[in-house]
Image: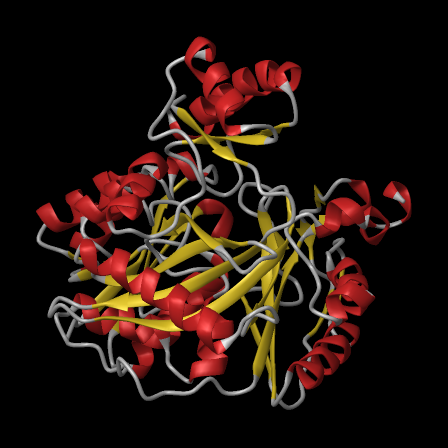
Amino acid sequence: MFKKVLVANRGEIALRVIRACRELGIATVAVYSEADRESLHVRFADDDVCIGPAPARDSYLKISQIIAAAEITGADAIHPGYGFLAENAEFAEIVRASNIAFIGPTPAQIRAMGDKAEARRLAAEAEVPIIPGTPGPVADIEEALPAAQRLGYPVIIKAAAGGGGKGMRVANDEDEFARHFALARGEALAAFGSDAVYLEKYLEKPRHVEIQILGDEHGHVVHLCERDCSVQRRHQKLIEEAPSPAMTPELRAAMGAAAVKLASRIGYVGAGTMEFLLNGDRSFYFMEMNTRIQVEHPVTEMTTGWDLVKEQIRIAAGEPLTVPAQGFQLRGHAIECRVNAEDASRNFQPSPGTITVFHPPGGPGVRLDTHIYAGYTVPPYYDSLIAKLIVHGNCRAEALARMHQALDGFIIEGITTTIPFLSRVIQHPAFQAGDVDTRFLERERHLLGEAEA
């Protein structure tokens, strides 16, 4: 097992990894930018190193600084968390070349699944259902337009190297397609350094359901069931739950088998997520794979009882999976709400600033993953996620009731947060009934607040 792990991240996920390491008896190193000097992940790590100024490009994305921090502190492994360099194959290569273990999949696996077009090709080879689309990137509008016509509108233009909703545009007709194609390529180039895009048929009202998988160096791959991530805004997940309200035992078995089949085909090592779109007729299609721990991993932990971050660390140390291929049962229902420092009524405008009052929720089945506290200043330089509120109940109705009271008792003052918005969503009759899809918020814009009602 490792002696010291450097956490190449910040915020709640850095704290989450530090806690897992402590349970395993592993020392930790926090890296931080000048803006994060007072962050809790710095306080709770055994060692810490400032790696640069506030902008991420000068700190959390600075590979040379992170490697230097690992070397001067004697870290023998690096955990990338999510975001920043977590799915950067070059980073994984440099870490390994520096004789430091990378807690994640191989560079080749990151590269293969990070290219969305290549991931689709691999899924098709593994006979995993994929959404009808182009076999790879389209070179220009002259090649793209006939392909869109063959697929039939609406179609979605997607960045081949992308994720997180960037470089994605939906076109409902030929005129929209011509405009959105150029916009998507420009967004892709700005976000990922590549303007390569491909096309897919756009499903009108699908659910977003993903399967959590784990693979070790001994050839074992298992899945830990699904998460439903259908409540989204501009392809960004806002609320996740497990199990999915739309799931049946037969569908879970089929989706789980497809996820394991694709992961096994590439010899996947580590934690990862296979993301699918689930149609109303219960047909499902592979969309992409995330080769890292997910923001929403706690709902899987709450319903399976397995610590996914500790499993990541054990796998990277060469140990076999402790999760059985079969034999565990889902326990109750879990829901996660992402709390952001944003104003939902103003198009989710970021709201950085100093937190003057912080009163966390509590009670049975309530978990809060956060790095904030009274007096903490939310910086304007990074993602606005400030907390993840997770609840667990014996059934979905109990989980919903617990989430309602937890949001009601979660007090943050000094900045604007999405807590009131989240409370409105979970009380909506459609969400209460589990009858939502990825376009739910487009139809229910009144939930955003009075300014956009």
Q: Nearer the viewer, residue 285 or 32?
A: 285
Q: Residue at x 42, y 26 (%)?
A: 197
Q: Quadrant of the N terminus?
A: bottom left
Relative to 157, residue 436 above or below: below
Quadrant for residue 242, please give it: bottom right
Residue 176: percent from the left, percent from the top? 65, 19
The mark tally for this picture is 0
Residue 442 showing in the rendered view: yes
Quadrant for residue 134, please give it: top left
Q: Nearer the viewer, residue 140 or 17?
A: 140
Residue 23: percent from the left, percent from the top? 32, 83
Q: Is residue 192 left or right of residue 207?
A: left
Relative to 437, residue 303 above or below: below
Q: Nearer the viewer, residue 117 or 337?
A: 117
Q: Residue at x 70, y 76 (%)?
A: 403
Residue 198: percent from the left, percent from the top? 42, 28
Q: Residue furthest top?
A: 142
Residue 102: percent from the left, percent from the top? 20, 56
Color scheme of the displayed model: secondary structure
Q: Residue at x 74, y 71 (%)?
A: 433
Residue 44 showing in the rendered view: no
Quadrant for residue 31, please give it: bottom left
Q: Is residue 81 left or right of residue 190?
A: left
Q: Is residue 302 left or right of residue 170?
A: left
Q: Is residue 100 left or right of residue 348?
A: left
Q: Quadrant of the C terminus?
A: top right
Relative to 114, residue 129 above or below: below
